[in-house]
Amino acid sequence: MKKAERNRISKRRALTMLKNADLLELGVEAEGIRKALHPEGIVTFIVDRNINYTNVCINKCRFCAFWRDKDAPDAYLLDEKTLFEKIEETIELGGTQILIQGGLHPSLDINYYVKLLSSIKKRFDINVHGFSPPEICYIADSADLTIRETLVILREAGLDSVPGGGAEILSDRVREILSPKKIKSSRWLTVMENAHRIGMRTTATMMFGSIESPEDIIEHLDSIRALQDRTGGFTAFIPWSFQPGNTELSRGLSQYTSVTAVDYLRVLALSRIYLDNFDNIQASWVTQGLKLAQVSLRFGANDFGSTMIEENVVASTGVSYRVSKEDIINAIRSSGFRPAQRDTYYNLIKRF
Ligand code: SF4
């Protein structure tokens, strides 16, 4: 079944499916699409490291447990030496990418980012997947540049690809409550469109399970499907669930109940069905654990994401699954799939 042969589903049908479809029926449909796109049964993962260069952030999103004020006792900005050591260690462990992102630090300007990127590229042969759309907009605004100009400057300095962070739910009604200071949906999409137009690949993400409605989830999926139709620049879609620990939002939600395994699988499967122009859907073992990530492989996912040599943002909510590369390989294999290490662009590097 090629992409063109599948019937694109409408927003209305997707909403009905998200709300009412039988979970296993959704799974069977998503699994069928995954199989058609990846008939060889390979499930990929990448060896990389999350480097969060600063936890200082002026946005103070209500769902985030990671940010600190600039003068907080545990506020930090990584120095070059620490950063380089982390990259060296990543390369020694077979890593091919660093995912570098952080808060919106009021003292950093575009020169900091240009210097950071060029100093990394001067020393290391590694893909720099960095700076999610809120950071790109912050850099652009403080330098009085357009988003496109900013992306071109960062790319010339060494930025290779852009992570899809900061999307949460692409509905301004939801964003107004979750993260009123953060960029609105249209700017997130504009950053991604500009990145694609200058030849950079990016991922798309969605954080669900906070205060959004099923309609908001469909709106989000529809926005990224439409952009992918225009540019084809997304490599993958990564849905994960809100982790309430240590967040202002969870303290304000008196009756909050966490996303269940069933909710997660339902959204994952529907994403695979709705996003008919995405090749890759990632399972999120970081938020769901390895066991549910294994089940995800029968609900449309074909990628296990990163080995996460380091992870700080989800860990700051109190959720921390520690797994090794071998754990990931075993988890994939014991689910009946063939594990393979990939690069940022989903090229296979090594089969296991
Ligand atoms: S989610 Fe990102 S932008 Fe929002 S407070 Fe946390 S670090 Fe800042």
Image: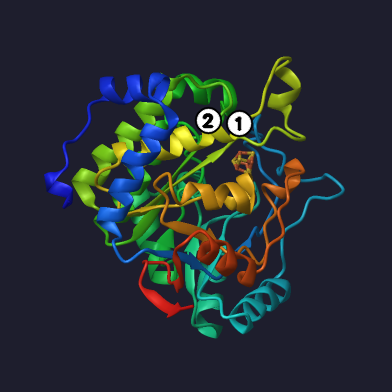
Q: Work out whether residue 337 or residue 251 is closer to the camera in this orientation and state it.
A: 337
Give the crowd class for mark 2: few <14, some 14-19, many >=20 residues within 10 Å.
Answer: some
Spot occupied by residue 152 in the image (x, y as percentages of width and height): 35, 61
In the picture, the disc for residue 245 is: none
Q: Is residue 68 visible?
A: no
Report the residue at 27% width, 22% height from top: 13
Report the residue at 57% width, 37% height from top: 241
Looking at the picture, which amino acid does disc 2 mark? Asp
> Tell me, what colour scheme is on the image?
rainbow
In three-dimensional space, the C-alpha distance between marks 2 and 1, rounded to whole angstroms, equals: 5 Å
Tell whether 60 sits left or right of 270: right
List the single residue furthest toward the right.
73
Q: Work out whether residue 34 or residue 234 is closer to the camera in this orientation and state it.
A: 34
Q: Which residue is mark 2?
A: 263
Secondary structure of the residue carrying tag 2 is helix
Q: Which residue is mark 1?
A: 260
Looking at the picture, which amino acid does disc 1 mark? Thr
Q: Is the C-beta separation of discs 2 and 1 under 8 Å?
A: yes
Q: Work out whether residue 149 or residue 48 is closer to the camera in this orientation and state it.
A: 48
Report the residue at 51% width, 83% height from top: 122
Spot occupied by residue 242 in the image (x, y as percentages of width and height): 61, 35
Give the crowd class for mark 1: few <14, some 14-19, many >=20 residues within 10 Å.
Answer: few
Spot occupied by residue 90 in the image (x, y as percentages of width and height): 62, 76
